[in-house]
Image (spheres, rainbow, N blue to C red):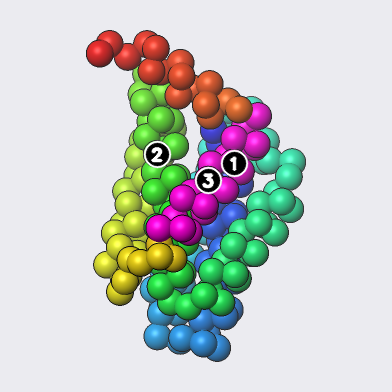
Amino acid sequence: MLKVNHAGEFGAIRIYGAQIWLARRLFPDIVPALQEMREDEIDHCRLFREAMPARNAKPCRVMAFWSLGGFLLGFLTALGGRNMIWICTEAVESTVHRHLEDQLAFLQTRDPELHRLIASIQEQELAHLQETEKNQTTRGFAYRILLPIIGFLTDLMIWLSTWGDSSWMRAEMASSTPV
Ligand SMILES: [Fe+2]
Ligand SMILES: [Fe+2]
């Protein structure tokens, strides 16, 4: 969990970094909002890194992959305009939110300290999600096409980084939760 969360935050920093770089030239009005969110992701990345040693976790071996993937996603969406930036953030944050929910359920009794950390980070990610929803002027064709694609790519990255543990965890909890 720490490995994929840490790598994911790193990817998010790169997404925002690329978007900020282009937004400075194309639509500077949204730079402050993006910068604020990037600051949060830097914080999250550090917090997950700091939680690693006590739990014998190590950073993901394919950080370069996250770095490149994040940069490309940020850059390409920013080329599409303001709205596309917010769609990208919404897709990523809502996918991340779903995974954090799974993690929280799993950790509740297993690691209360990490549970607290993730819950506080999740609160900030939710604020990011609300901010993107607020900023979208239209939700047309691009929204319907891009949202599932970016959501799928985010899921795929998470799945690859945990070698499928993310879906194992979800199935395990589904079978142990009383209906
Ligand atoms: Fe984050
Ligand atoms: Fe975020």
Residue at image x 29%, y 59%?
130
Secondary structure of the residue carrying numbered label 2: helix
Q: Position of residue 139 (x, y in %)?
A: 33, 66
The residue nearer to you, when weighing 77 against 40, is: 77
Q: Looking at the image, tell me whether mark 2 or mark 1 is earlier in sequence order.
A: 2
Q: Does residue 50 show up?
A: no
User: Which secondary structure, mark 1?
Assistant: helix
**Residue at 45% across, 70% down:** 84
Is 155 inside the magenta-drawn segment? yes
In terms of secondary structure, what is the magenta stretch mainly? helix
Q: Are marks 3 and 2 in contact (CB under 8 Å)?
A: no
Left or right: 129 as drawn, with respect to 28: left
Q: Amino acid at mark 1?
A: Leu
Q: Give the extent of the magenta segment.
A: 144-163
Spatial CA distance of label 3 from label 1 is 6 Å
Quadrant (top left/top right/bottom left/bottom right) for the N terminus: top right
Q: In this orientation, does residue 34 appear?
A: yes
Name of the residue lying farthest toward the front: 141
Q: Are marks 3 and 1 in contact (CB under 8 Å)?
A: yes
> Mark 3 highlights which residue?
152
Tags 2 and 1 touching, CB below 8 Å: no
Q: Is residue 76 magenta?
A: no
Residue 65 location, x and y as percent?
71, 51
Residue at left 61%, top 43%?
157
Q: Amino acid at mark 3?
A: Phe
Label 2: which residue?
98
Say if 106 sits above or below 176 in the image.
below
Residue 135 lies in quadrant: bottom left
> Which residue, given by chain and number where applicable, does mark 1 sit on?
156
- What's the CA distance linking mark 2 and mark 1? 14 Å
Query: Where is residue 179 drawn, in percent x and y?
Result: 25, 13
Residue drawn at the location 62% of the way across and 32% of the way down: 162
